[in-house]
Amino acid sequence: MALNREESSPLFAGTVAGTLRLLAYLALAMVLMVLDHRNGWTWRARYAAAVVVEPLYRLAGAPSAGLHALTVAFAERKTLTEDNQRLREDLLLANAKLNRMAAVAEQNQRLKELLDTQRSLELNVQLARVIGVDLGPGEDRIMLGVGANSGIHVGQPVIDARGVMGQVVHVLPSTSVVMLVTDPAHAVPVTVERTGLRTIAYGTRDGSGLMLPDIPLAADVRVGDRLLTSGLGGRFPPGFPVGTIRRVRTAPTGMFLEAMAQPAADLDRSEDVLLLHDQAEPVGPPAPAAPVGPPADLAMPVSAGSAPAPAATGATQ
Amino acid sequence: MNRQRIALYWFSATIAVSLVAMLVPLPTVLQPFKPYWPALVLLYWALESGERVNLGLAFVVGLLADLLDGVLLGEQALRLTALVFIALRFRSRLRFFPMWQQTLAVLALLINDRILLLIVRSFAGEASPTLSWWFSPFVGAALWPFLFLLLDDLRIRLRIA
């Protein structure tokens, strides 16, 4: 036995066969990585293995859920009362605002109907719970406890009470992954609320905030300006708060202004989030209006004898 | 026979727990300090029972880890295979190091692992990480003596070779 061990792990020199095996495995891993980078197999494999993978995610999320339950269970009565009081005040304030807004919203709806736009202020949302799972370092992603079985699909915007959180990037049968707006790979088209300037907000490298790297030098952007989604690109509906500008400076190249913004949503603390469903908003220019010609009566002599014309005149009379 | 089966179960259980521990989130402040659990557990088994761990096993565990928590399929497979290869190559020496030397060796292995990850990430075109990204190997090395003693104690209690 001891002799055998010596052979499998010699004291000084390694065997050639061992090195060759290492190289073979490394090559295999690299081939897998390249193929995955091109085709995105990881998530397909995860979807196929969902029966095993999803319970493990739930299991891994259990400690943070348990901790949360414990803090609630052992929270002091005073804290809870204070919380309750604060929430009541918030609700009162929100209701008061809503009441004031209701009339305006109705008026807005009527005006929009007059303008014949399809946009509506109503939200078609779905509530989802966040599962506390660490999805690898250097990534700003969260996992939600709803998936394809609940009608979730890739690209759905995710919001909380304060603003835009991100969008769904991967879907498993009963869980899904959301890329937050602060992820370095994320970008969201925004407008500055005060001036209407359109630009794009990217996530930062360390995931701490939002970065607006290409604002024209002449543009009027100030600290404290609020950013809203512009609705360009068709992914996020317009008008949701994205963040607040915290710092503005000239970019190192000297060609643009660079602004850092604080996300509006509670990215770290949200327990429940809202998933927006499609609002059937057309992407791109509105459909061309139906051609309005002269009244059908006048067209009669030209298209005399055609079948629909008499019917049309009959309807107008 | 029964003893062997227990040994196999115990071995698989430690690996499975390390994979789940990798997924468990820490509070935001502690997040960068999270050690790479599967690497530590695989290292322990590579040092303590070298005939159980081979490159193929490291590759499969890496693929499982990727399936759970990876950006790219094959990334952790590559890292763990390299790690286990080095550990097995120097196993006879590492085993008889005093604990502080072993800890330093583990630190070197974990830093090497981070460098491999950095290479893979930069090839995949991802943003370079911040300074806090480098804390994890140090935490892993600092935890190594405790993990080693704990696992060794349990192994001896279960009388697993």
Image: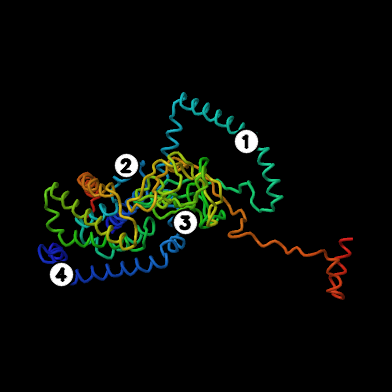
Give the class, few, some or many, for how many residues have Cα within 10 Å of label 1's Cα (few <14, many ≥20): few
Instruction: Name the chain under label 4.
Output: A
Q: How far apart are marks 4 and 3 (CA)?
A: 45 Å
Q: Label 1 sits on what residue type? A: Leu
Q: In the displayed image of the protein, which residue is found farthest to the front?
A: A218
Q: Distance between the residues labelled 4 and 2?
A: 42 Å
Q: How far apart are marks 1 and 4 (CA)?
A: 76 Å
Marks 1 and 4 belong to one chain? yes
CB atoms at circles 2 and 3 under 8 Å apart? no
Residue A169, disc: 3
Q: Distance between the residues labelled 1 and 3?
A: 33 Å
Marks 2 and 3 belong to one chain? no
Q: Which of marks 4 and 3 is in front?
A: 3
Going from N to C along the chain, the mark reached first, 1 or 3, is 1
How far across and how far down the image is residue A250, in percent? 36, 47
Residue topped by disc 1: A98
- Secondary structure of the residue carrying numbered label 2: loop
Q: How far apart are marks 2 and 1 (CA)?
A: 40 Å
Instruction: Name the chain under label 3.
Output: A
- Secondary structure of the residue carrying numbered label 3: strand
